[in-house]
Image (cartoon, rainbow, N blue to C red):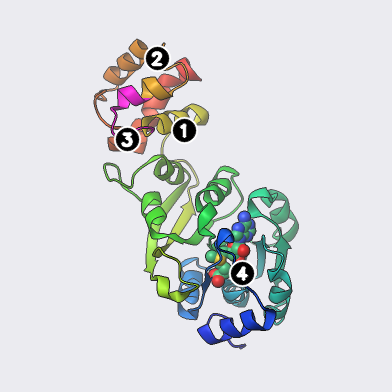
Amino acid sequence: MYKDIATPGRTKEILERYGFSFKKSLGQNFLIDANILRKIVDVADISPDTGAIEIGPGIGALTEQLARRAKKVVAFEIDGRLLPILADTLSPYDNVRIFHQDVLKADLHAVIAEELADVSDRMVVANLPYYVTTPIIMKLLTERLPIRGMVVMLQKEVADRLAAKPGTKDYGSLTIAVQYYTEAEVVMTVPRTVFMPQPNVDSAVIRLVKRQHPPVVVDDEGVFFQVVRASFAQRRKTLFNNLTNNLPGGKENKEQIERVLVALGIDPRRRGETLDIAEFASLSNALAPLFG
Ligand code: SAM
């Protein structure tokens, strides 16, 4: 077994050898605690049948832990300066493929079809760059990739939003989107001291397991997400005001919106954050004929 990359000493040595300087704008905070990385791999349930997809391998700290347990690892790194470093640090592993690419621009279906056609299980595992956490998660979810799910490190505050319950301050449109596609669970919180350089927020690891079927029946997903977003547009406003002000054509359909709410037994004076996903589904199904 090779020495772990994720120790303060080895990380410093690699960075110095290559004269690497961190780019804050790319969310470069590397993990220097191999135990936490191994826990992440455990929580993701990575086995010799798994194809792991990593976003932002950095100098390979998580990549090598994945390579030791998975059948294959495919990783996307935006920063070209890291490619020669990764070629060096990951040279002991022949099951890793690095793509020099912005993951937001990557054709993930094509990469999976090419690189991971022969695995029976696929999982995204990543210590995400914090400046693009939400767009990355939304891309992975909405593209309906053939994956089991994802285990990702992100800002604790965002993790709390993804796993929030109705009626709490963290509950919002992102919560509903994530819980529509996955079962979300915060599996550990991680102190800032295990990163180099230290970020100025605490972090958490969240596990999102893709649902086979959505938890609610939604007639028109476009209208569903429109209604959800409109309901949370101004958190201090009532549901009725948010819907009329923020749905396109909402003002012209004021009376119909009120009628729909009353017919569903949803008090128009409630706030969006008190509705659970089932209520959003019945509301959007009833509004779909008006807005679909
Ligand atoms: N996985 C490493 C670790 O845990 O030590 C590094 C994690 S660091 C938080 C995030 C990594 O994502 C950096 O290597 C950064 O260059 C890379 N990155 C940032 N934006 C990216 C993007 N849009 N696509 C792919 N990689 C990105």
Disc 1 from disc 4: Cα separation: 34 Å
Q: What mark, if any, has residue 225 been given in the picture? A: 1
Which residue bears the numbered disc 4?
58
Q: Nearer the viewer, mark 1 or mark 2?
A: 2
Disc 2 from disc 3: Cα separation: 18 Å
Q: Pinpoint residue 160: horizontal percent, then vertical percent.
A: 36, 54
Label 3 amino acid? Arg
Look at the numbered disc 3 and give the secondary structure of its residue: loop
Disc 1 from disc 2: Cα separation: 19 Å
Whether residues under marks 4 and 3 lie with C-beta atoms below 8 angstroms apart, the answer is no
**Quadrant of residue 180 within the rendered picture:** top left
Which sits earlier in the primary sequence, circle 2 or circle 3?
3
Above or below, comparing residue 5 to residue 240 in the picture: below
Q: Is residue 249 left or right of residue 56?
A: left
Q: Nearer the viewer, residue 271 or 132?
A: 132
Q: Pinpoint residue 46: horizontal percent, then vertical percent.
A: 54, 69
- Crowd around label 1: few <14 · some 14–19 · many ≥20 (10 Å): some
On the rendered image, what quadrant is the N terminus found in? bottom right
Q: Pinpoint residue 130: horizontal percent, then vertical percent.
A: 50, 58
Q: Is mark 4 within 8 Å of ligand 1?
A: yes
Disc 3 from disc 1: Cα separation: 16 Å
Q: Nearer the viewer, mark 1 or mark 4?
A: 4
Q: Nearer the viewer, residue 139 or 183?
A: 139
Which sits earlier in the primary sequence, circle 4 or circle 3?
4
Above or below, comparing residue 233 to residue 31 in the picture: above
Which residue bears the numbered disc 3?
235
**Is 235 a magenta residue?**
yes
